[in-house]
Image (tube, helix red, strand yellow):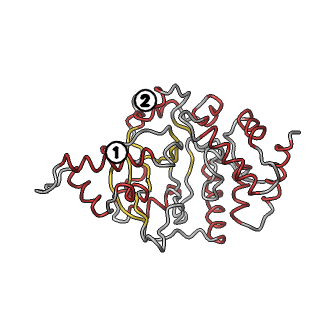
Amino acid sequence: MNPSHQSLRLLLSDLLGSTDVVLRARAENFRFEERVSPARHAQYEANHGPAAATHDCWFESHADYLATSVHTSLPETFQAMNADAALKAAVSSALGGEQILIRVESLDYALSEINTSLADLEETLAIYKGKHDPLVTAGDAKALLQKVCGSLNRNPYAVRPRFAAFAQELEDDIEASDWALRLRDRLGLAHLPPTNAYGPHPVVLMCYRVREVTERAHALHADHPLTVPTVLDSEPYEVFHPSPCEQDYGRTLNLAGLIDDDRLASEVLHMRIDYAPSHIWKVGSITARADTSPTRLSTLRGDHLALLQILSGRDDFGVL
C-alpha cells in the first residue's frame, strides 16, 4: 500500500474517535461521502495523501490537491472523473436553464480595493435599478458596479468552483429585511462573520440563470456544468455535510437549526462565471456571528444527519 494511502486512512480512523468536534466532523464527511468515484478517490489518495497521519499534514496535502486539480480554469469537479456527482441533465436543459441561481459573496475585498462604502454601494445599486438622482447617472452607477464585479472576478478566491442555491426555494428569506442573516444560516455560511476590527461583514447577493453557467461550461469543454458538492471540491469543513446519493442535490447545514422538513436548502456547485452588474440583486451585511461552538455544531450535525436519513429513507446513511 502506498504510504500516503495508509497515512490518510490511519488519520481518518484516529479523527473519528477524537473528542474535538471539528476534527471529527471533517473525518466524518470523508466517511459519509457517497459521490466521489473510486477512480477519483484513488487518484486523490495516491497523489495527494498526507505525508504523515496528522491533521496538519492532511490539510497541507489537501490544499495542494485543490490548487492543482480544483482551483483551476477547468476543475476536475466538472470533468468525466466526477460524473457520479453531476446533476441530472434536466437542470441544464432549455427549461432548467431558466432557473435562477443565487450566491452570497463577501464584499470586504472589493470595497477595500475600490475604496467605497457599503452605504454608497447600496445607493449606487438603487440608481442603477431606476432610482432618480440628479447628481449620479445610471451610467455612472453601472460603472461603479462594474468595478465591484471586476474585483469579485479577480480576487484570490475567484478561481474556485462556486456553491449556489436556487432562488425560488429561498424566496421568503431573500425578501426578508434580515435576508443576509437568514441566508447566512440557511446556506451554512459560517465563514462570513462580523469582526471586532471591521464590524458587520458586507455581502452582495448575486443572481444569474443556470444557462449562463452551462454556456461557460460548454465554452471550456467541461463534461458537466453543475454538480452536487463533495468533500474533494473544497477544504475540509465541519459546516459542510455530504448528502446521500438518493438526494438530487447537496443539502446545506442550517445554522439556525431545523424547524421543519423544508429547511434543508438545495445546494449545487457550478463552473465559475464572470459577474456583471446585472447579476447584483442586493447588498447588505451580516451583523451577528453564527453559533458554531462545539456543543452547538454537534447538535446541528446530528439533527441534519437524522433528517437526511428520513428524507432519503436511509437509516444506514452516516452510520460508521
At horizontal 54% and vertical 60% (from top left) the residue drawn is: 191
- Near mark 2 (Cα within 10 A), the count class, few <14, some 14-19 or many ≥20, is some
Give, as a three-letter code, the residue at label 1.
His
Q: Bin the neighbour count of mark 1 within 10 Å (Cα to Cα): few under 14, some 14-19, many 20 and up.
A: some
Residue 232 is left or right of residue 218, and the answer is: right
Q: Nearer the viewer, residue 198 or 39?
A: 198
Q: Amino acid at mark 2?
A: Glu
Q: Position of residue 238 (x, y in %)?
A: 64, 59
Tag 1 secondary structure: helix
Residue for point 72% across, 55% down? 28
Q: Residue furthest bottom?
A: 196
Q: Which residue is mark 1?
A: 279
Residue 273: x %, y % from top left: 43, 38
The picture quadrant where one finds residue 115 is bottom left
The answer to whether residue 4 of the structure is visible from this angle is yes
Residue toward you, 287 or 318: 287
Residue named by callout 2: 215
Q: Is residue 313 left or right of residue 215?
A: right
Left or right of 243? Residue 155 is left
Q: If the image is split into quadrants, where does the N terminus sit?
A: top right
- Distance in Å between CA atoms under marks 2 and 1: 16 Å
Task: Determine whether the residue tagged by mark 2 lies in a helix, strand or loop.
Answer: helix
Tell me the residue at 63%/56% (across/down). 237
Labels 2 and 1: the sequence-earlier one: 2
Q: Quadrant of residue 118?
A: bottom left
**Total numbered circles:** 2
Question: 289 or 92, which lies in front?
Answer: 289
For residue 185, above or below residue 44: below
> Residue shown at 50%/27% (left/top)?
220
